[in-house]
Image (tube, grey):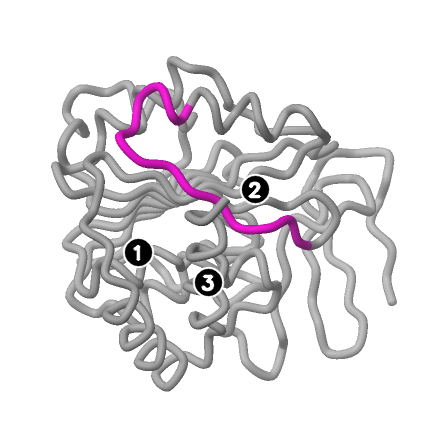
Amino acid sequence: MSIPDLMTNAPAISEQDGIRNLHFGTLNIQGAMRISDPYALEFEYIQQMMIWTLFKESPAHIVQLGLGAGSLTKFCYKHFTLSQITAIELDPAVIDICRSDFALPSDDQRLSTIAMDAMNYVTNVNHHGMVDILQVDLYDALALGPALGSLDFYQACADCLSPEGIMTVNLFCDYPDHDKNLEMMEQVFQSVAWLPEVHDSNVVAIAFKHSPSVDFDQLYDRAEVIDRKWNLPAKTWVDRLMDWMRE
């Protein structure tokens, strides 16, 4: 196992047991790839970020804020072949290392990888109403909390979504910061739900611009399809959503 250089925030790589990990100058893992299956989603919380697939089958435009090791961007690019995929990443070096070491494809007619600040992207009125799925996973090198987590940020995220748009967010932080972020989301989205904590303080939330009509029988049917197609534990997402609604 190689150890990342802790004296710099530059992207670095470690490998162990067939897994390649991305670091930003600390031992914190910012993303991972199974070398034998580079398009798979390795961690449970990353899999949970795909919970939106229970509600939307073929989005026109998927946007990723925070590239990490490119896992979600690659997965969406491979499996949603009719979708436009846009990845927003502040650090061009992260984009470079994802392409050289984490199997991120080059940009083409469907994939756009843009080096820019996520806040600038979501506050740009040209993007408002243009995104069907927004996946948010924004962290700096220390990963002490979301790099963007203000009410203004979540409002801008909601503004970017199409009328039936959905946002998923990975909240990696200490309590009570989970609740603070969820409360801000609830101020600007009609419906917000979240899954139980996994992987040392990772909580994945799903936010709907407009509240969906929820039929749990249909969700379980859809979960079977997701499990069969992509080997994702979607039934557990429905179980947890049902538990959440009963609380």
Q: Classify 10 Å Cα crowding around label 3: few (below 14), some (14-19), many (20 and above).
A: many
Q: Amino acid at mark 3?
A: Trp
Q: Reading the chain from its start, which is encountered first: label 1 or label 3?
A: 1
The answer to whether residue 169 is left or right of residue 83 is right
Front residue of 198/141: it is: 198
Q: Amino acid at mark 1?
A: Asp
Query: Element under label 2?
Result: helix
Q: Nearer the viewer, mark 1 or mark 3?
A: 3
Which portion, as a residue range, is magenta?
185-198
Pointer 3 residue: 237
The correct choice, above or below, for 43 with respect to 198 in the image is below
The answer to whether residue 181 is left or right of residue 208 is right
Q: Amino acid at mark 2?
A: Ala
Q: Reading the chain from its start, which is encountered first: label 2 or label 1?
A: 2
Residue 18 x/y as whole percent: 73, 78
Pointer 2 residue: 93
Pointer 1 residue: 107
The correct choice, above or below, for 29 with respect to 222 in the image is above
The correct choice, above or below, for 84 with respect to 128 in the image is below
Front residue of 162/82: it is: 162
Query: Disc 2 vs disc 1: Cβ atoms closer than 8 Å?
Result: no
Give the quarter of the image for residue 172.
Answer: top right
Residue 217 x/y as whole percent: 27, 71
